[in-house]
Image (spheres, rainbow, N blue to C red):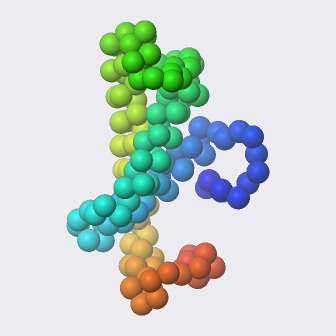
Amino acid sequence: MYKTDEDKFYISKTEMEEKLIALLGGRVAEQVALDDISTGASNDLEVATKLARDMIMVYGMSEKIGPISLKVDDVRELEFYGNEIQDEVGKEIKRLIDTAYSRAVQILNANRDKLDAVAQRLLEKETISQREFEEFFI
């Protein structure tokens, strides 16, 4: 699993994909547990979308587009690559987000008892420490 406390100068595609799953976990938890969503995960969605975009446009992590960097300072610069590439970039970003979302749903459904236990504790205490959170998984 992706660890944020590691000090390194690179991150693998697998770690980025795991980070996407984690970022989407809050939104998925709402959907799974409440059958509704809120604005609570909006920042996580923003970060996840930027990460997916960087994976495709900066790090060349799309088999469909290939190992090229489409890093641009202004979205209009993307026009240089043509409409086909622009469309593919959008599709690839959506594919990464959709795949991560589906995986988060699978993980939370498989661990629904833990999700409910954490949610119950949060209703009681509002915040819990990392140690308290990890105790649910021992």
- Quadrant assignment for the N terminus: bottom right
Q: Is 50 in front, or is 85?
A: 50
Image quadrant containing the C terminus: bottom right
Query: What is the residue that sits farthest to the left in this orientation?
Result: 35
| Residue sitting at x 47%, y 40% | 50
**Looking at the picture, how far across and down is residue 86, in whole percent?**
37, 19
For residue 9, which quarter of the picture? Answer: top right
* Residue for point 37% across, 35% down: 95
In the picture, measured across the screen, residue 16 lies left or right of residue 88, that is: right
Q: Name the spot of residue 39 as percent of width and height, x first.
A: 31, 61
Q: Residue at x 60, y 46 (%)?
A: 15
Q: Is residue 83 above or below residue 18?
A: above
Image height of 81 relative to 13, above or below: above
Q: Is residue 73 above or below residue 18?
A: above
Q: Is residue 67 visible?
A: yes
**How many marks are shown on the rendered structure?**
0
Q: Is residue 113 visible?
A: no
Q: Please provide percent x and percent y for residue 120.
A: 39, 85
**Residue 44 in picture, x, y percent from top left:** 44, 54
Outermost residue to the bottom? 124
Nearer the observer, 20 or 45 = 45
129 horizontally vs 10: left or right: left
